[in-house]
Amino acid sequence: MKRKGFYVLATVAMLALAAGCGSNQGEETSENQVTEAVSPTEAPEATVTPEPTATPAPTATPVPANYMEANGIEVLGAGWHTAKGFMVKDVDENGNPILGLADCEYCFEVTEAENDGSTKVIQAVLYVKPYVPENGLWSTFAMGGFVDLKTGKAFLPMDEELLQTTLLKQDGKEYELQLSMEFEGVSTTRPYYTERYTLVCPSDYDDAGFYLTGYAYDWEAFIERAGLWKKLNFIRHEESDMVVFGVNQGLETEPAKKPVVGAELAVENYFEVNGYSTLGEGTYTWQGMEALKKRNAETGYWETVSLEEKELTNTISIEEESLGDGTKRIKLTSVDMAEYLSEDEARVPYSRGGMVDKKTGVVYMPRMYGLAEEYVLAKDGEEISIIVATESVQEDLDDGKVRIEYSCMVICPEDFDDIVFYVTCNAEIREDENTYSNEPEVFSLDEIERGDCDLLFFR
């Protein structure tokens, strides 16, 4: 099992559907008849009949407008919403996840366009932000689907990207719906688990909705639901919440926006003020720190027990490519060497690196290796979005040597040229070196406790 420091562990996002079973409708006698009441054997005592009183007029009970109202389900609009979902607490001896509940973040986006006068096309996107507990076992255990808000009937296409035709019966009417779905897993270029739906329906159909809920790692639930209509309350999501989004509600609300971060940490003309310059590709020797690490027999983590000043040598390579959509991908790769002293003891460069905005000195880091993070930056009166990710790969060589390849990647607008990568070392042992956070890491470059270690910049 790979861990942070030497090892990386990640749980792949899972997708499935769920279904329930029917309810008991009551009891009957063996003759399918109602049993008569037994007559009393003694005459009842006489009672005084009270004077008749005026009977108040009955209060009319409001009839629920639809299934959602009848079941107390709030229909949400566009944007980010928090609900109880599943996260991975640990894994069992077979590598299967042990689930727990956590506050998970879901997002809904939707657009609608007229098609041919009699139909319309609805494009809906559901996002799930990966949950990262302290142990680093990130996950997106969620599942979604289409739901008719009037009847509560839910549906998910059987085959990804195939436009599947199905009929919805509602109050004596029949609607022909064409629905397709595709999903994207989390990666170093995609920060969220994503489900994309395309719905082609009659122009007068106004009850389209979508739902997200926790996935309880139940493959049988997927088999039961694939390509079939199921009532929403039959979806087996265990203790997790279920959130329902309405297309009309989504069209009436503002699209989801991530907040601008890092502005309060910015220093104007940071590189010029500090006299920093950048280097290119090549091999460099610089003053850093080397850590003596030992494996904790109980936790399995590699823990730093001491630090020693040492000259380190890194080989740096940089790649840049246009993605053809107005953005570019920049990747810096740094190669370090470590050494095993025994099976449970090693010497490792105590280096760290990442991406920094050279104009502000603000560092934008993802939450852990292999997991992309999206940030919104304020630049010259405009807001731009960037995606940042890191990954680490190790290769065992001869004589106990280990080649560690660390990469930092940024996806940003093609005309954004403030990206700079840095490499340095921590001068003190980090107490949180084996813990993770579910919050993005944003800080000023000045906050790194590097002591006498060099600070190198590359572009």
Image: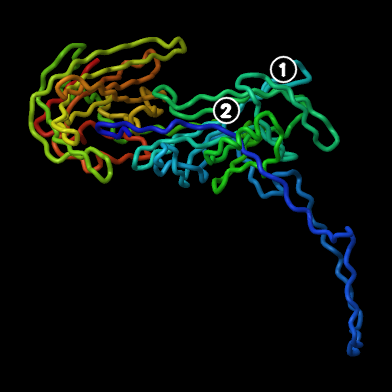
**Kind of residue at badge 1:** Asn
Instruction: Report whether 419 appears left or right of 324.
Output: left
Residue 115, label in figure? 1
Give the residue displayed 13% in from the left and 16% down from the top: 284
Quarter of the rendering occupied by the C terminus: top left
Task: Judge whether 284 appears above or below 77 on screen.
Answer: above
Who is closer to the viewer here, 424 or 296? Answer: 296
Instruction: Give the mark toward the camera: 1 or 2.
Output: 2
Who is closer to the viewer here, 284 or 89? Answer: 89
- The reply to whether the C-beta atoms of the residues labelled 1 and 2 are less than 8 Å apart is no
Could you tell me residue 347's position as x and y percent? 14, 31
Report which residue position mark 2 lands on: 125
Instruction: Report whether 282 appears left or right of 373.
Output: left
Give the residue displayed 82% in from the left and 30% down from the top: 174
Could you tell me residue 431's position as x and y percent? 22, 43
- Looking at the rendered structure, the secondary structure element under dot 1 is loop
Could you tell me residue 230's position as x and y percent? 70, 37
Residue 288, label in figure? none
